[in-house]
Structure formats: C-alpha cells, structure tokens
Image (spheres, rainbow, N blue to C red):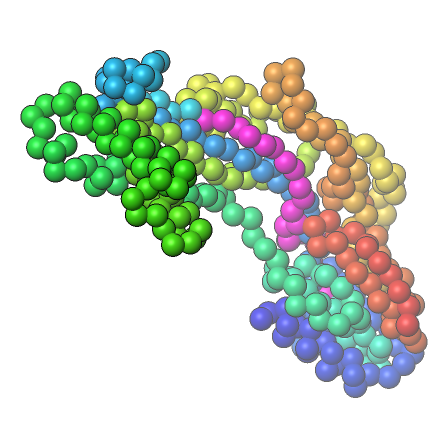
Amino acid sequence: MKHIKLYLTTCLLASASTLFAQTEVTAGVSRGKDYGVTYLLPKTKIKIELQISKHTFTPGEFVRFAGRYLHMNNVSANASEEWTLDKVSTSLLGEPDKENVYFVKLKDKTVAPLMELTEDGVVRSINYPFSGIKTTKPTEASKSKTEKEITFAEARSYFTEEILSAGSTAKMAELTAKEIYTIRESKNALLRGEADNMPQDGAQLKLMIDQLTRQEQALTMLFTGKRTEEHLVKTIEITPKEMNNEIIFRFSKKLGLLDKDDLAGEPYQLTIVDMKTPSIPLETDAKKKLEGIAYNVPGRAKVTLTQGNHKLYVGEMPVTQFGCLEYLAPGLFNKTQCKVQFDVKTGGLLKIDRE
C-alpha cells in the first residue's frame, strides 16, 4: 500500500496547486518539513532461468521374471537417477538502486507531477492514472506434479487372494503375469463387443476400459519398474559488468545444478560486453544543482552464454549500469502536465505525452 499512499498524497497536493512555479528535484531523501515524494531509480540485473528435469528409475519387485513371464528383455534391475537441462532463457530484472534516490519537492503554486511508484519505491509513471500493477518476485524453484500417479502400493492393491497366498516371489510373479493377461483379454472382449456384461453406453465403456488399463499398467510396472520425472525451474541473477567466459554455474547429469565452484559438474560460462552506447557525457561539477526528473539512459550489452563450444544464448539487452543519468526539463511540468512512463527494469523512458 506504500506506493498507493504516495500516489494519493501527491494527487491531493497537486490538485490544490496553481501555475507558474516549478517542481524542485534533489538527490537524497526529504529535507525538513518539505512536502514531496522520494523515489529511486533501478539498476539492471540479468535473470537466467533454467528448466531442469530429474529422471528417476526404480526397478520393480518382479524384475527378474520380466523376460520369463512377459517376454520383456533388457529390463534394468538397477535404480538410477539422471538430470537434464532442458531449456535456458534470459530476461531482465529491475532492482532499486539505493545510490540513486531523489526527492520531488512539491512547492506552493506548482503544477507538481503525480507520481506512481512500485512497491520498492522505483518511479513507474508521472501524471498517468494509477495502474495497480504489482511487481512480481521471481520464484527460486517450482515443481510440476503428476496427477493420479501410479505407485507400487497401488499395484499391490490389485493382487488377488491367490497371488497374496503364493509361497514364493517366483510364484507371485507367475500369478501376477496371468492376471495381466486376463485383464488384456477382458479389454479385448469389451472392444469387440463380446463381453458377457457389456456397458450400456460409450461413457461407461470408456470408464471400464480406463480402469482395466490402469490395473494393467500398475501390475506391469512390478516387472518393468517405474520411471518418474520431476520438473524444476531455477533462476540465477547476475549483476551486469564486463566479463569474459566467467563461470556462473555448473551442471551434472548425476547431480543436477551445482555451484560454480563445484568441479563435479560441467561449467557454463557467461560473457558480457559493453557496446558503449549511448556515449557517456563528460563528468560535470558534483555540486551542480539538479533540475527536473532524473531518469536512466540505459546502455547496451552483448550477452553470450556458452557450455564448451556450444552457444546457448547470444543477444543484446539494455543495461542501466552501462548507460548514463539524464533529467527531464522542469518546464515540462509547468503550465501543462506532461505524462511520462518509465521502464521499472532499467529506469529508461518508455513514453512522453503532453496534455
């Protein structure tokens, strides 16, 4: 609610104003009893999003009998776990820059700007209606869930009394295989319309076939084993600076995502090159009085992510740290209200309109 209160307070102050004076903007926080709005400019972060999958295989209790009773050869009897890096994507994040804090003083007789801020105090717009946009925070990891997953416990729930009474694992496997063949015969009879108790309609037929299929899959899993997949999304945030083939993370098929210093995984390297645009103006007197609304003019960076000789990402993106600071002329907010929108990720100008 912080940004809403700031916005409403500024609106009330501006509604009572008249023309001709101008709004004063100073670096830092509010001074004394002056009325105004403190805002920040953002600095850029590069977010690297990794879509990762964990593949797990668990052998079934009848794995030794898969070839004998179901004619399934080369079924593994060893549990295994493997990780894969499925997709890599990049995007920008905006982070409040505590070194770029400004205060808009709302003087009497001023057509003062109506400012909207994000939850973190970064300026979003001037003289636009309140957007209500909330800044979303990146999630570190998310897991996809498989609905109605077949488990070994469910498979054993389909055991008949004869199977449970068997005196050995080999006999249980033999009887379970016979049950699988019986289920298959029942499915074929339903599909051919030759079953003794045929369903009344198509919906009931589908339900019966689905139930038989699930039972067949569950019991077969006791021979072939169970394969599961777990999908994760991991994010890595990088503060841009010029770098050349710097390792930012490692990845292992056996261990998954690893820290950049863990030598058990293959290195993934990042290169960031400052494109030197726009040209940075010469340094001016630090004591020079600030005028207008401060905003960022982002520079451009070429970003390359590689693994060995393979380039996973190559592209250009705006980076605040490679740009410069500029100010909107105070006259824009005098006799007429200028409408301005800013990019909350870079602090750059998106749009300027004059009413």
Residue 153, percent across and down? 23, 39
Residue 281, percent across and down? 88, 43
Q: Main secondary structure of the magenta part?
A: strand
The N terminus - image quarter: bottom right
Magenta residues, as a range?
83-103
Task: State which quadrant residue 195 falls in.
Answer: top left
Q: Is residue 136 visible?
A: yes
Q: Is residue 258 visible?
A: no
Q: Nearer the viewer, residue 63 or 11?
A: 63
- Residue drawn where x is 41% and y is 47% of the image: 206
Q: Is residue 221 depicted above or below 35 in this figure?
A: above
The C terminus - image quarter: bottom right
Q: Nearer the viewer, residue 212 or 82?
A: 212
Q: Is residue 36 depicted above or below 84 in this figure?
A: below
Q: Verify whether residue 48 appears in magenta.
A: no
- Residue drawn where x is 27% and y is 32% of the image: 182
Q: Is residue 293 depicted above or below 270 in this figure?
A: below
Is 311 left or right of 161, judged from the image as shown?
right
Q: Nearer the viewer, residue 236 or 26?
A: 236
The tally of labels here is 0
Residue 294, percent across and down? 79, 57
Is 142 left or right of 104, judged from the image as shown?
left
- Residue drawn where x is 15% and y is 20% of the image: 170
Residue 144, percent across and down? 46, 43
Task: State which quadrant residue 128 falls in.
Answer: bottom right
Is 276 left or right of 90, judged from the image as shown?
right
